[in-house]
Image (cartoon, rainbow, N blue to C red):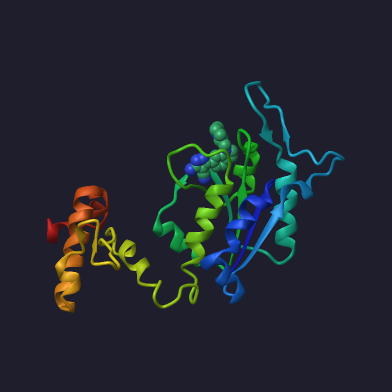
Amino acid sequence: MRIDLVTIFPPLVAGAFEQSIIKRARDRGIVEIHVNDLREYATDRHRTVDDYPYGGGAGMVMKPEPWFRAVEHLREQGHPGPCVLLTPQGRRLDQALVRRLAAEDRLIILCGRYEGVDERVREHLADIEVSIGDYVLSGGEPAAVVLTDAVVRLQPGALGSSESTVEESFSEGLLEYPQYTRPPEFRGWRVPDVLLSGDHGAVERWRREQQQHRTRRRRPDLLQEQGDVSEATS
Ligand code: JE8
């Protein structure tokens, strides 16, 4: 898979892709990530990417021309694949949408700043508008890092065998079970006996119960989405 990001702050996103799982996936050739500087697609001497809003109001709006030039340039390089605009008005990101995007051969991800992008970018350039959640960010870059991380870890071979199980619990629509490591007692707080028992069946059952219990208490909305699981266990 190839992912192209477009931003006025390349270093802000590039650093996040130079560590850990994403770095390893890149090194293995599982994913190719390119961070493109929007200003390179501005045409004036000052590389202007923003301007005053028509109709007045606070702040600046990102001009359409550099976005169209950037995306058209990337597509000329033999780059089809959907163009994702990160925006608070977008469809809320969830694991189902991550899976859909992860199945693409290529993605172009647009990160806006200031008060956002000219409406014509949404209407005529973006294929899908995505938001990572209902809180205010200063720009699309942190959202792009979140989206890219979620998409890359679903690429075949991106995770080591010990990491791959972690994905399962959310796929099943449940929260994860409590996890412990050594020491068996820390400041008087003991690890549950069942985890030290060596009884793998009992451990498995305990973890299932914990997942169900936690999900019912903290995220009953997840059980609603599943239907049959909530009926069977509540
Ligand atoms: C952004 C964003 C996602 C999320 C995404 C892109 C571009 C209109 N507002 C713009 C006013 C306050 C500042 C905003 C800055 N901004 C935010 C997001 C996002 N995806 N889940 N929250 N925020 C832009 C400019």
Q: Residue at point 15% right, 68% down?
A: 193
Q: Is residue 133 above or below residue 163?
A: above
Q: Quadrant of ligand 1?
A: top right
Question: Image check: 106 left or right of 50?
Answer: left
Q: Is residue 233 above or below residue 134?
A: below
Q: Residue at point 13% right, 61% down?
A: 232
Q: Quadrant of residue 112?
A: top right
- In the picture, the quarter occupied by the N terminus is bottom right
Question: Image check: 144 left or right of 35?
Answer: left
Residue 35 x %, y %: 67, 57
**Residue 89 visible at all:** no
**Residue 215 visible at all:** yes
Residue 127 x %, y %: 57, 52
Residue 151 x %, y %: 50, 62
Q: Is residue 151 above or below residue 86?
A: below
Q: In the displayed image of the protein, which residue is found farthest to the right?
A: 45
Q: In front: 125, or 179? A: 179
Q: Residue at point 87% right, 40% down?
A: 45
Q: Is residue 41 above or below residue 166?
A: above
- In the picture, the quarter occupied by the C terminus is bottom left
Q: Quadrant of residue 81?
A: bottom right
Residue 74 x %, y %: 71, 59
Q: Quadrant of residue 59?
A: top right
Q: In front: 111, or 11? A: 11
